[in-house]
Image (cartoon, grey):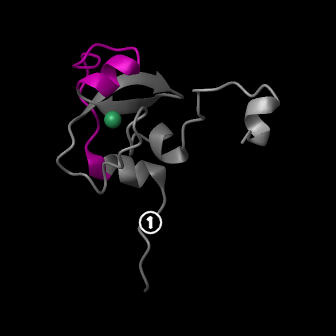
Amino acid sequence: MYSQDSISGHRRGRREPTPEMLAGLACLICGTDYRSAPDAEAVVVAHRDDKQLLACRGTCARMAGASVDGLDETPLPLAERVRAHGSPPAQDA
Ligand SMILES: [Zn+2]
């Protein structure tokens, strides 16, 4: 089976980062959502539009082009990132 994407020459292996990734709320590489994975250790691996892009310490950080420990920079606290992202958690008022 061939998907429409693969036969039309779409570039493979490079997905667009999700808004969560761009907001530093999810790993740039594996997509782990740090809001729901409080044990994941996120490190700063890149910047985009003055925002930190995060990946899990280790393999993900390496794949993102940084060292396993990321850049020499401390990520913003998760709460700050969530607030900057501006999307309130789904909840009924
Ligand atoms: Zn990851």
Q: Quadrant of residue 65?
A: top left
Magenta span main SS: loop
Return the x and y of residue 62 as percentages of the image width and height: 32, 17
Return the x and y of residue 58 as percentages of the image width and height: 23, 24
In the image, what residue type sits under mark 1? Pro
| Of 30 and 89, the residue lying toward us | 30
- Is 88 left or right of 62, judged from the image as shown? right
Q: Is residue 57 above or below residue 83?
A: above
Q: Quadrant of residue 70?
A: top left
For the N terminus, the quadrant is top right
Q: Is residue 41 above or below residue 67?
A: below
- The quarter of the image that holds ligand 1 is top left
Q: Residues within 10 Å of mark 1 (few under 14, many from 20)?
A: few
Return the x and y of residue 38 as percentages of the image width and height: 21, 51
Return the x and y of residue 56 as percentages of the image width and height: 28, 33
The magenta span reads 58-79
Q: Is residue 61 above or below residue 89?
A: above
| Count of residue discs | 1
- Judging by the rendered image, the residue that carries numbered circle 1 is 88
Which residue is found at the position 20% from the left and 37% from the top? Answer: 41
For the C terminus, the quadrant is bottom left
Look at the image and say whether residue 66 sits in the magenta stretch: yes
| Of 53 and 14, the residue lying toward us | 14
Which residue is found at the position 40% from the left and 30% from the top? Answer: 52
Look at the image and say whether residue 45 sits in the magenta stretch: no
Which residue is found at the position 23% from the left and 28% from the top? Answer: 57
